[in-house]
Amino acid sequence: MSDHRHENEERGSHDLAVEEARPKIKQPPLYRVVLINDDFTPMEFVVDILESIFGMERTRATQVMLEVHTKGKGVCGVFNFEIAETKVAQVMGVARQHQHPLLCTMEES
């Protein structure tokens, strides 16, 4: 019986060695999508953007909107490059459609 257990222990440590030898896969960089404050875009419009494009609950959307309003900018979320780029384009498109000068950018997280 002890021989069998010893064999399992060896196999277990061998698996661990193989696991450690695997190269670490580098995660792709993530990007923050950021709204920039302006003096013209209505607060309610910003809240609506945060709810519709970023899927935020009203309370969270209001918190982010207030952050944009008081600190000059606010983070809407962190995404991979393609999603961040799409979100920025969506925000800018909707803002222009409604003739608001709202700016949205992305920065590496």
Image (cartoon, helix red, strand yellow):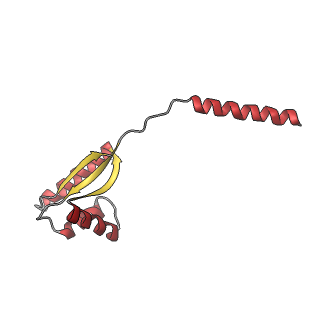
| Residue 91 placement (x, y as % from top left) | 22, 56
Q: Residue reaching furthest right?
A: 1
Q: Residue at x 29, y 64 (%)?
A: 64
Question: Seen in the image, is 75 located left or right of residue 98?
Answer: right
Question: How far from the left and from the top, in percent, is residue 67?
Answer: 26, 64
Left or right: 15 in relation to 69:
right
Q: Is residue 48 visible?
A: no
Horizontal relation, residue 82 to residue 95: left or right: right
Residue 36 location (% of width, % of height): 19, 57
Residue 45 shows in this picture = yes
- Residue at 17% of width from left, 60% of height from top? 37
The total number of labels drawn is: 0
Of residues 8 and 51, which is closer to you in this image? 8
| Residue at 80% across, 32% down | 7
Which of the 4 quarters of the picture holds residue 26?
Answer: top left
- Quadrant position of the N terminus in the picture: top right
Q: Residue at coordinates 13% horizontally, 57% vertically from top-left? A: 96
When the figure is inspected, residue 66 is found, relative to residue 95, above or below; the finding is below
